Image: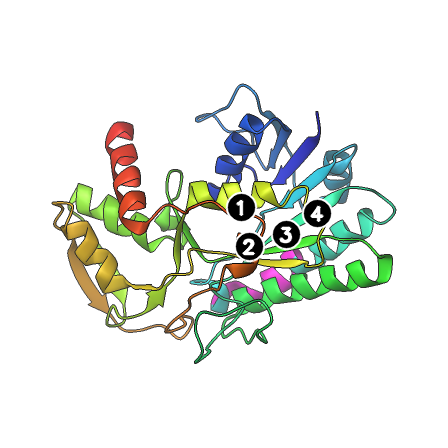
Amino acid sequence: MKKVLILGGSGFIGRNLSLFLSKAGYEVYSFDLVKPTNHVLPEVHYIAGDFFDDDDLKSAIEDKDYIIHAISTINPGNSNECYVRGYEKDFLQTVKLCNLLIGRSTRLIFLSSGGTVYGHHEIQPINENVLPQPINHYGNIKLCMENTIRTFNYQMHIKMLIVRISNPYGPGQDFKKGVGFIDAVLKNAISGEPVMVWGDGKNVRDYIYIEDVCKMITSLMEYNGEYDTFNVSSGIGVSQNEVIESVKGMGLKPQVVYMDKRSVDVRKIILDNSRMKTVWKKELITLEEGLKNYYNYLLNEN
């Protein structure tokens, strides 16, 4: 059984990947600062350690066949304040990780941000060949990591992969950590709290259900083709106002408060998933299905 290490395994994407990969037949190791106390999966090995401690990192990656890098200490909303930490910690430690993998057969899959690395572009949807022009430090730090990985690939003749995820949503997300518009709309509509919208609500995003994200990433585990970068997305753009209307159509009554727009937000981002669909060829969960699935999950959790 092949061993997979998920760096940031207690996060939103990491937890869902742990579950999905374990069901797919991989031996999964979830690495994070502390071992989780809830939503613990009996088939997953939990490792408590510090990604930024070289000894902890060396120990964690030992004898692993795959490493999924899902750690970030900043998010798009706070990156203008915390960017130094992102460059000094996230970026530099990712360079060290790549260096530790020299001479190994371990495959690294880096989870980048399709919603921020591209920046403003008139032509949508955006494919992987478009020149990235991030407008916030979060996206730029992700792009720095991507380029480091590509350089290691070229110099060492290896194939580490880059996954540019659009806007995932679903079970396990927490919008209070800085990302997750759909998460905020559903949870606040249930609790009666107001939903904060930065701008006029016309910002367009490419929302994808977390289950589909996990399926696509898993399909890349054994990929040996020519590409090193993949958009993981629905390929469909939806505005924040349209999300709110869809939630209203489910019988909920979200209270919306429109705030001043933020400089860190791209107006429109839709990712072309044609390349990914050559590897993962099945149908994706629609936004309507995903909203209902997540809503039912939240009701059962409460």
Few, some or many residues within 10 Å of mark 2 (<14, 14–19, 20+): some
First in residue order: circle 3 vs circle 1 = 3
Q: Nearer the viewer, mark 1 or mark 4?
A: 1
Report the residue at 43% width, 44% height from top.
Answer: 210
Residue 300 location (% of width, % of height): 26, 28
Q: Secondary structure at mark 2?
A: helix
Q: Which residue is mark 3?
A: 110
Q: Nearer the viewer, mark 3 or mark 1?
A: 1
First in residue order: circle 1 vs circle 4 = 4
Real-space Cα distance between discs 1 and 4? Answer: 15 Å
Q: Are marks 1 and 2 in contact (CB under 8 Å)?
A: yes
Outermost residue on the bottom side: it is 122
Real-space Cα distance between discs 3 and 1? Answer: 13 Å
First in residue order: circle 3 vs circle 2 = 3
Report the residue at 66% width, 61% height from top.
Answer: 145
Q: Are marks 3 and 1 in contact (CB under 8 Å)?
A: no
Few, some or many residues within 10 Å of mark 4 (<14, 14–19, 20+): many
Q: Which residue is mark 1?
A: 216
Q: Which residue is mark 4?
A: 108
Residue 272 location (% of width, % of height): 48, 64
What segment is highlighted magenta in the picture? 81-90
Real-space Cα distance between discs 3 and 2? Answer: 15 Å
Instruction: Tell me the kind of residue under disc 2.
Output: Met
